[in-house]
Amino acid sequence: MQAPAVTVDPLQLVIGEEELLVERAVRAALDAARLADPTAELSRSPVADVTPAEFAELVSPSLFSEGRVIVLEAAQDASQEIADAVLSYCASPADGIVLVVLHSGGGRSKAGKGLPNALRKAGAVVTECPKITKPADREAFVRNEVRRVGGKIDAAGVSGLIEAIGNDLRELSSAATQLVADSGGVVDERAVRRYHRGRAEVTGFAVAEKAVTGDRAAALEAARWAAQLGVPHVLVADALADAVRTIARVTAYPRSDPGRLASQLGMPPWKVRKAQGQARGWSPAGLAVAMQVAADVNADVKGAAADANYALERAVLRIVDARALR
């Protein structure tokens, strides 16, 4: 029995600035084209570098009918001439050719700004790739990544993974995939801590957490481990500043619901809950001192201090002492 023919969308619009998602959309278009024609090739060109004549050549059917995926990058920079050429082609796309237009969603020219709507009207399949900047969107991304590879993750696992890995989507995706494989498909906070313990313990955030909770010995030990393992000084200084600043912001709303406060402050709920717990040991006077210490050490690690390691250790100890001020 003959397999059914594979139908590939000949016109595709990928709109947004989240690089990982954009690259996935391009890869998906190429994979689909290669299901129809295993020899299909990928060609990428910034729209500003393509003339109407060159575009016509790119999308012209070949003598041997090879499949092709033509990617026009940065279509928000399109001139009126190239925009007209693209839309003219879209009225009658060639067989075996997939045109993928990458657009940021903005544009300085009228032609660039208007291209997405015109492509939609021409029947292009649209893939949205908005920039992921909000904590809730990043948490949703992690959940989707785990689900994409067949796993499940709870809320504590999501927050723990972001805390251990950071905000880089490629690293979060890679870590989520690895965790699903290593944990048998079910990811929780314990699994995250187990597989990322080494990394979490030598980040600036681990140093900061020990300092703001007043654990002098553990904070000093974490700072020395971070220095020994090569964690950049500026990352530790930034983490100290972020921890102190977060506590200060949360203490301004002492009885607020974490979910509502998270939305108000633009933070993930888990971070608000943690800061609310840490804030119980701090006085306004102590926070004022700690914020000044954080500002000072930021300058120190960027060249003001002769010994950045010493400056960080001193800052950690001063923050621990500030917590005891009343």
Image (spheres, grey):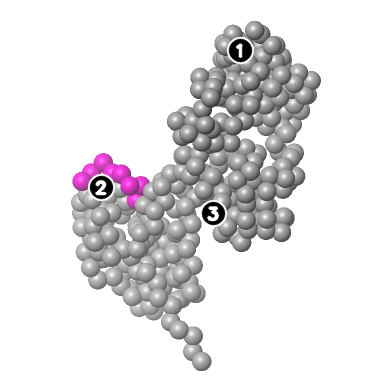
The percent position of residue 300, horizontal first and vertical second, equals 61, 14
Query: Can you tell which of label 2 and label 1 is closer to the viewer?
Result: 1
Determine which residue is flagged by label 2. 113
Q: What element carries label 3?
A: helix
In the image, taking residue 168 as reference, residue 83 lies left or right, namely left
Q: Looking at the picture, how far across and down is residue 218, in whole percent?
A: 77, 24
Q: Where is residue 5 in the image (x, y as percent from the top left)?
A: 43, 82
Foreground disc of the pair 1, 3: 1
Dot 2: what SS? helix
Q: Does the magenta stretch include residue 130?
A: no
Q: Give the range drawn in magenta.
A: 103-110
> In the image shown, does 62 or 326 lie closer to the viewer?
326
Residue appearing at x 72%, y 55% in the figure: 183
Tell which of 174 and 281 is nearer to you: 281
* Nearer to us: label 3 or label 2: 3
Q: Which of 260 and 141 is in front in this view?
A: 260
Q: Name the residue under label 3.
A: 144
Q: Can residue 293 be seen in this view?
A: no
Quick one: quadrant of the C terminus? top right
Q: How far apart are marks 2 and 1 (CA)?
A: 52 Å
Q: Mark 1 points at which residue?
A: 283
Give the residue type that dot 1 points to: Ser
Structural crowding at the residue carrying mark 3, measured as other residues with C-alpha within 10 Å and reported as few (<14), some (14–19) or many (≥20): some
